[in-house]
Image: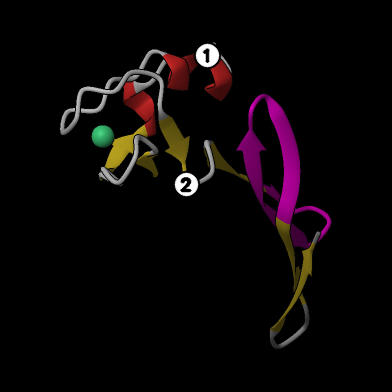
Amino acid sequence: MTCNIQCLNGRCDRRVDVRLETLPQDQPWSSVGLRMVCSACGAAGSVHNVGAYASFAVDTELYSELGYGELTLSLINMGTRNYYLSARVDKQKASSNIVAMVG
Ligand SMILES: [Zn+2]
């Protein structure tokens, strides 16, 4: 997972992709961004996070005795967790049925 970071110093406009794992995981973007220095123009703290400072998590659960399984893909953003996609697969006599929900 990467985010795209843009320098806001004058017309520099340099953009770089940064792997989220290399940034401090326990600090908000507001303090991480202030400590960044542009490698093109040398400006400090003059950055804009173009991409979301976020990652996804996938949960799956198979209830074989109940005949269905569920998959949930959720967006984790600054410590909050918003559900993004959830799918349920029902086993039927000769086939399977899948229901997807987003939100
Ligand atoms: Zn710059």
Residue located 31% across and 23% down the image: 22
Distance between the alpha carbons at the discs numbered 1 and 2: 16 Å
Residue located 29% across and 23% down the image: 43
Marks 2 and 1: in contact by CB < 8 Å? no
Question: Is 78 included in the stretch rendered in magenta?
Answer: yes
Give how far across and how far down residue 49 sits, in percent: 47, 38
Q: Which residues are magenta?
A: 61-84
Give how far across and how far down residue 23 sits, in percent: 38, 21
Dot 2: element: loop
Question: In the image, is residue 72 above or below residue 80?
Answer: below
- 51 sits left or right of 30 in the view: left
Which residue of the protein is positioned furthest toward the bottom in this rendering? 94
Residue located 64% across and 27% down the image: 78
Front position in the image: 43 or 36: 43
The amino acid marked with disc number 2 is: Val
Give how far across and how far down residue 36 sits, in percent: 34, 19
Q: Which residue is mark 2?
A: 50
Question: Is 12 included in the stretch rendered in magenta?
Answer: no
Front position in the image: 93 or 62: 62
The amino acid marked with disc number 1 is: Ser
Q: Which residue is mark 1?
A: 31
Which residue of the protein is positioned furthest toward the left in this rendering? 40
- 47 sits left or right of 69 in the view: left
Q: Based on the displayed image, in which of its 4 quarters is residue 71 positioned?
A: bottom right
Q: Local crowd at mark 1 within 10 Å, few (<14), some, or many (≥20)?
A: few
